[in-house]
Amino acid sequence: MIMPNSNKRFLACGCAMRSHLIPVTVSIVLAALNTTAMAQDSTQPATYGSIALSSGFSPDPHVVDITVGGDNNAADTDSSCVGYVASSPDYSLEYTYEQYALGIFAISATDTTLLINDPEGVWFCNDDSGDLDSANPGIYFSSPKTGRYDIWVGSYSTETNYGSAKIVISEQDTANWRTIATSLAGTSAPIDDPVNSVPVTPIEPPVVIPTEGVIQYGRKSL
């Protein structure tokens, strides 16, 4: 089971943020299935598509535009999770691990949450990441597993359902997440309603170019 990096700020107890990154073991999930049906269904195709990436992928980051939220309470998956998500994954990543850490985060003007089912069937959730500005969530896998990662981006409340957001997949150090988010601001493609229309084709963003004295790559050099 992947254990989140203990040095990451979104794991700190007693912080002012609503941040939490909680792995939920497969046994707990299976126990929950005895009493209630899972709201999240990894067997369904992802609404906004999927991609296969291997360690060292380029361009980094990989970004996809989505619409967040849904009718299902993420707390039905685990009581530590928050937000409202769709039944089907928003996006799926088939990842081949070799050497780099893996980060998956979301950026949006609305308050979002993040829920990921990893290749071993372990659930991870996060609300506000300390490595991002505003109310954006992120999950960092220091030793990612090879396999499929199903990703849901939720809205913190039903009042902010169906806002636009970006899912960002990167092997760069978490110290760079804010710079990546800033570089992507204002680059959203039009978002279709996933219920009433066909999702748009994701647009690949330009590579983030490091600036001396501003970005230092601790995991991967571009």
Image (cartoon, rainbow, N blue to C red):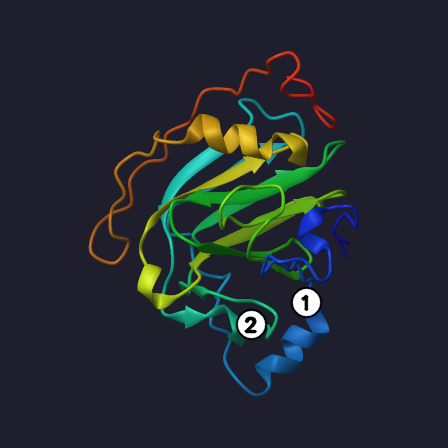
150 on left or right of 192: right
Residue 94 place in picture, x, y as percent: 57, 43
Which secondary structure, mark 2?
Answer: loop
108 on left or right of 14: left
Residue 139 place in picture, x, y as percent: 62, 48
Q: Which residue is the site of mark 1?
A: 24
Of the 4 image quadrants, the one containing the N terminus is bottom right
- Judge whether 109 appears above or below 211 on screen: below
Of the 4 image quadrants, the one containing the C terminus is top right
Residue 183 place in picture, x, y as percent: 46, 26
Q: Is residue 61 visible?
A: no
The kind of residue on which mark 2 rests is Thr
Q: Residues within 10 Å of mark 1 (few under 14, many from 20)?
A: many
Most distant residue in the bottom direction: 35
- Judge whether 61 appears above or below 112 on screen: above
Q: Is residue 197 visible?
A: yes
The kind of residue on which mark 1 rests is Val
Q: Residues within 10 Å of mark 2 (few under 14, many from 20)?
A: many
Residue 84 occupies which quadrant of the picture? bottom left
Residue drawn at x 79%, y 50% as measured from the top left: 6
Most distant residue in the left direction: 196
Q: Which mark is residue 77?
A: 2
- Judge whether 204 appears above or below 195 on screen: above
Q: Which mark is residue 93?
A: none
Residue drawn at x 71%, y 74% as measured from the top left: 27
Residue drawn at x 61%, y 81% as measured from the top left: 32
- Judge whether 98 appears above or below 24 on screen: above
Q: Nearer the viewer, residue 194 or 54?
A: 194
174 on left or right of 7: left
Q: Are marks 1 and 2 in contact (CB under 8 Å)?
A: yes
Residue 51 place in picture, x, y as percent: 49, 38
